[in-house]
Each structure stands twice: as structure tokens, then as C-alpha cells.
Image (cartoon, grey):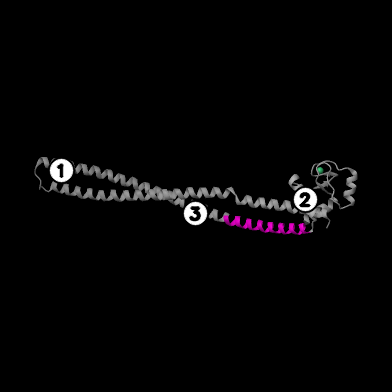
Amino acid sequence: MSQLELLWRLQQHDNRLAQLLLKLKEIENEKRMDDLKVRLKQVEYDITHRKTQKEVDEVKIQRASSKLEQMTCKLSDVEKKLYDGSVSDLKQLTFMSKEAQEIKKESIKLEKDILNLMEETEKLEQELNKSTSLYNALKAEMEKNIEEYKAVAERLKLKIKKEKAALEIILSKLDEEQKIKYSTLKEKKGKVVAEVIDGKCRGCHITIPLFIMCKLKNKDEITYCDNCGRILYYREQGYINTVKTNA
Ligand SMILES: [Zn+2]
């Protein structure tokens, strides 16, 4: 294989390797994963917050219920004394009757509070169920993404390995002088070897003079574009396509 052909192939593999490395970097920094992580954290926070709120409400219900129980006992005591005739003092009777009314009033309020709290815990329970379902769905999506990411990354890494191996082979066949020229030009121009299509350099789009075209058609030696300084690569159209697909 001529040095020119080697340079052309070196550039093909070089470009492919750069693209693969870029893709790998892109999937490593994928935004979709970050978004999922943020959402998972939010839902996790919601769940903890609602659980705590529910626990607090349950303690409140317990306290209110035992207080209500005490009230009921007290009321029955007061009412018993009020009606069993053991107390005859009018002043004391009036006081006790007032006390019974107060207890009843307070009991009604406690019952209402308990009902409200029960409603609230029920609502919290529903929200908690919803958040838990959402959390599980997000977690499953996250795990699926991680699996997908791993598979894609593995495939990319394998392709990268193959490209690197192909580059090694080409470089082992390329003259030292050409290697230096290639890296110097790559640093300066990015693209080192420019195809000649329809008599024009694909690097700078200038028309190649006829005498250079003749040289390109007949010899495999390294020829530079007068305008952009890139190495010119000319093949009959059909041949270029074959090389491209095989490379
Ligand atoms: Zn050019």
C-alpha cells in the first residue's frame, strides 16, 4: 500500500476514533440521567416528609383520643353526682351542671379535631402511595437507563479498541517522515488529506491546475494543494467509494 493510501486511511480511522470518543463522552455526561437523579431525590424527600407528617398526626390522634376518653369518664362522674341526689347544695349543683356543659363542649371539639386529623392522615396516606409508585417507576427507569448506558458504552469501547488497533497497523507501515508531516498538518489544519473531486480540492475548494491533476492521476506520490497545503488524494470516483466502504 502506498504512503498516500496509508495517510488517507490513517485520516479515516483517526476521524472515526475522534467521533467515537466524543460519543462516549456525551453518553457519560448525559443530561437525562441527571434529571432523573434530581427527580428521584425530590420524590424521596416528599415521601420522608409525608411519613413524618403522618406519624405526627397519628400521635396527635392518640393523644386526643385518650383525652376524649378521660372527658367521657369525667362527664359520667359529674352527671352521676348531679342526678343521684347525693348533692343538694344548689350552688354546687349549678357549678357541676356548668362543668358538665364545659366537658361536653370540649368533647365535641376534640371529636372534631380527631375527625379532621383522620381525614388528613388518610389524604397523606393516598399521597404517600402516589409518591411511592412514582418513586418505584423512576427508580426502574433509572436502572433501565443505567443498563442501556452500560450496553452502549461497551459497544463504543469495543469500536474504539478496533479503531485504535487499525491505527496501530497503519502507523507501523507509515514512514517516520510522513507521520511527522501528518501530525504537524493535523495540528495546523485539522484535516490533513483532502480528496480531489471534480478537479477541486475538498479542503479549500480551489480548482487544481491540470499539470498537478496529471501527476495525481499517474503517480502515488505525495502532492500538496498549492492553496491550502493539504495532501491531495485523488482516486477514480468508483475506487474512492470502494476504499471508503472497506476502510
Ligand atoms: Zn486545498
Which residue type does callout 1 highlight? Met
User: Dot 1 lies on which element?
Assistant: helix
Name the quadrant of the N terminus: bottom right
Residue under label 2 = 182
Residue 78 location, x and y as percent?
A: 16, 47
Residue shown at 47% from the left, 49% from the top? 43
Which residue type does callout 2 highlight? Tyr
Range of residues picked out in magenta? 146-172
Name the quadrant of the C terminus: bottom right
Residue shown at 21% from the left, 42% from the top? 102
Residue under label 1 = 96
Q: Mark 2 packing: few (<14 Cα in 10 Å), some, or many (20+)?
A: many
Q: Mark 1 packing: few (<14 Cα in 10 Å), some, or many (20+)?
A: some
Residue under label 3 = 136
Q: Nearer the viewer, residue 150 or 133?
A: 150
Which residue type does callout 3 highlight? Asn
Query: Total label count?
Result: 3
Using residue 54 as the reference point, say whether residue 247 is left or right of it: right
Point out the tag, 1 or 3, that comes first from the N-terminus. 1
Q: Nearer the viewer, residue 146 or 210?
A: 210
Using residue 187 as the reference point, say whether residue 75 is left or right of it: left
Q: Mark 3 packing: few (<14 Cα in 10 Å), some, or many (20+)?
A: some
